[in-house]
Image: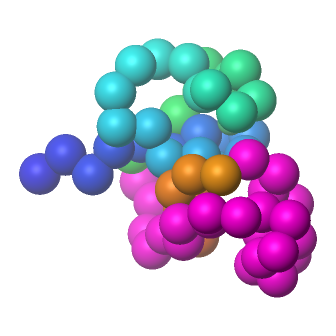
Amino acid sequence: MNMGKACRQCRYVLESGDKCPVCGSTAFTTFWRGYVIIIDPEKSDIAKKMGITSRGKYALRLSR
Ligand SMILES: [Zn+2]
């Protein structure tokens, strides 16, 4: 099952491609758990807590 991979820098979850569209990083991990979908980062407390400024899907925990 392909769950996508999470950016090691900002935790953005990418379903395809090799470069994070948010921070430009190319370091990913497929070992992650849980996610949040940020629709409006400016109004989201979770986004603020996690330091997210772009909308998208983000992993809650990276295992490695
Ligand atoms: Zn990133």
> Quadrant of the rendered structure where residue 51 is?
bottom right
Q: Position of residue 22 (x, y in %)?
A: 70, 33
Q: Per the image, is 63 magenta?
A: no
Q: Nearest the camera: 9 or 40?
A: 40
| Residue displayed at 82% across by 51% down | 53
> Quadrant of the rendered structure where residue 19 is?
top right
Q: Which residues are magenta?
A: 31-54
| Residue displayed at 46% across by 17% down | 18
| Residue displayed at 53% across by 34% down | 28
Q: Position of residue 58 (x, y in %)?
A: 57, 58
Q: Is residue 24 left or right of residue 30?
A: right
Residue 7 lies, with reference to residue 1, above or below; the image says above
Q: Is residue 55 left or right of residue 53?
A: left
Residue 49 lies, with reference to residue 14, above or below; the image says below
Q: Is residue 64 visible?
A: no
Q: Position of residue 36 (x, y in %)?
A: 54, 71
Residue at the far bottom: name it: 45
Residue at the far left: name it: 1
Q: Position of residue 39 (x, y in %)?
A: 61, 63
Q: Per the image, is 42 magenta?
A: yes
Q: Quadrant of ligand 1?
A: top right
| Residue displayed at 82% across by 74% down | 43
Report the coloring of the rendering. Answer: rainbow
